[in-house]
Amino acid sequence: MRRKLELQKYKTRGENTPHILFLTQDKGEGFDNALSVTVSLFEPGPEDKIGYDWEDSTGQRHTMDMPPYFISDIEAARRNIKEFIYLARPGYIEALLTDSNPIVCRTFQAALAYTAFGQVIN
């Protein structure tokens, strides 16, 4: 919690300019259906993790260094995540149901209509 408060007050390195990252999960996605997050650079402390560590199938360890960014507008990130989920959900469900039988598809359609609007599909 202390580090979070430090970062909120932190003067970003260099220019005090936030950056917008557009995050996607699959090929074919663009700015229109990407999650946008506002970030700023920070000077990492000794307790900050600025890399991604993993072990491959042969047991060899790897590290991918990452630039020191933090989410600088948490409230906007929350709003953007909620909007992204709302807008991306139909595409994800459609992709999951592509090879499903009609009963499964209709069940999902009914569930979505009910949760979104309280309506029943006949």
Image: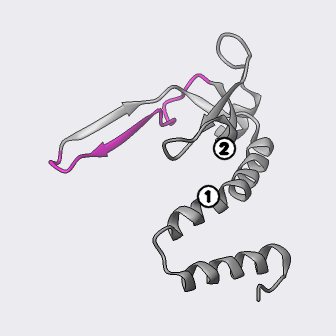
Helix, strand or loop at mark 2 = helix
In terms of depth relative to the viewer, which is nearer, 87 or 8? 87
Secondary structure mostly seen in magenta is loop
Where residue 54 sits, quadrant-wise, is top left
Please provide the residue range marked out in magenta: 42-59
The structure residue drawn at horizontal position 50% and vertical position 67%, both measured from the top left corner, is 98
Residue lying at the far left of the rendered structure = 58
Amino acid type shown at disc 1: Gly
**Of the numbered discs in the image, which one, if any, rests on residue 27?**
none
Question: Horizontal placement of 110 versus 46: left or right?
Answer: right
Residue receiving disc 1: 91
> Above or below — where is 117 with respect to 82?
below
**N-term mark: 2 or 1:** 2
Q: CA distance from mark 2 to mark 1?
A: 10 Å
Question: Horizontal placement of 56 versus 76: left or right?
Answer: left
Magenta includes 70?
no
The reply to whether dot 2 and dot 1 touch (C-beta < 8 Å) is yes
In terms of depth relative to the viewer, which is nearer, 15 or 45? 15
The structure residue drawn at horizontal position 75% and vertical position 49%, both measured from the top left corner, is 78
**How far across and down, in percent of the image, does residue 87 sit?**
72, 54
The structure residue drawn at horizontal position 80% and vertical position 72%, both measured from the top left corner, is 116
Amino acid type shown at disc 2: Asn
> Above or below — where is 96 with respect to 33?
below
In terms of depth relative to the viewer, which is nearer, 3 or 26? 26
In terms of depth relative to the viewer, which is nearer, 108 or 13? 108
The structure residue drawn at horizontal position 63% and vertical position 84%, both measured from the top left corner, is 107
Magenta includes 44?
yes
Residue receiving disc 2: 33
**Circle 1 residues within 10 Å: few <14, some 14–19, many ≥20:** few
